[in-house]
Image (spheres, rainbow, N blue to C red):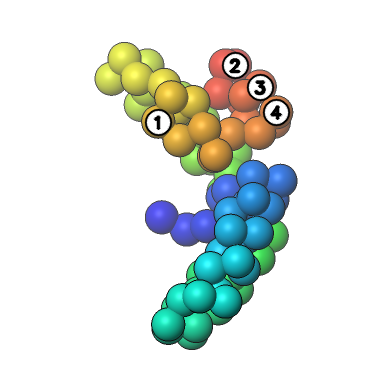
């Protein structure tokens, strides 16, 4: 999965945690790489596709993305998911 479909506002607490871990983590390059990846902005086209496709799959499976991966949904995602 690519991280550029995680809404920016939902990445902020993850980035904060990673930056704290960087001080105590032995392999700082791994943490730095994760921070760089998560710092990429949201790709809105991919995000919309992901949400709409997930909604279709969830209906077939009887699942809900909000239950499984709430960090992937922002207000735009909610409105697209429930269209």
Instruction: Identify the residue at image location x=60%, y=39%.
Output: 48
Give the structural element (helix, strand or loop) at label 4: helix
Closer to viewer: mark 4 or mark 2: 4
Q: Nearer the viewer, mark 2 or mark 1?
A: 1
Number of the front mark, 3 or 1: 1
Quadrant location of residue 79?
A: top right
Q: Which of the image's four quarters has the C terminus? A: top right
Q: CA distance from mark 4 to mark 1?
A: 17 Å
Q: SS of the residue at dot 3?
A: helix
Query: Which tag is nearer the camera, tag 3 or tag 2?
Result: 3
- Pointer 4: what residue? 75
| Residue holding disc 3 | 79
Dot 2: within a 10 Å radius of its alpha carbon, few (fewer than 14), some, or many (20 or more) residues? few
In the rendered structure, the answer to whether residue 52 lies left or right of residue 43 reads left
Question: Is 58 displayed left or right of 35 in the figure?
Answer: left
Query: Please, which residue is most extreme toward the left here?
Result: 61
Q: Residue at x 62, y 24 (%)?
A: 78
Q: Which residue is mark 1?
A: 68
Structural distance between the alpha carbons of marks 3 and 1: 17 Å
């Amino acid at each position: 999965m690519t991280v550029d479909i995680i809404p920016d506002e939902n990445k902020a607490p993850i980035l904060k945690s990673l930056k704290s871990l960087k001080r105590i983590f032995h392999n700082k390059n791994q943490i730095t790489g994760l921070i760089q990846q998560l710092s990429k902005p949201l790709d809105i086209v991919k995000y919309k596709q992901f949400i709409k496709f997930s909604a279709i799959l969830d209906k077939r499976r009887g699942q809900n993305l909000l239950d499984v991966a709430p960090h992937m949904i922002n207000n735009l995602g909610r409105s697209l998911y429930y269209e």
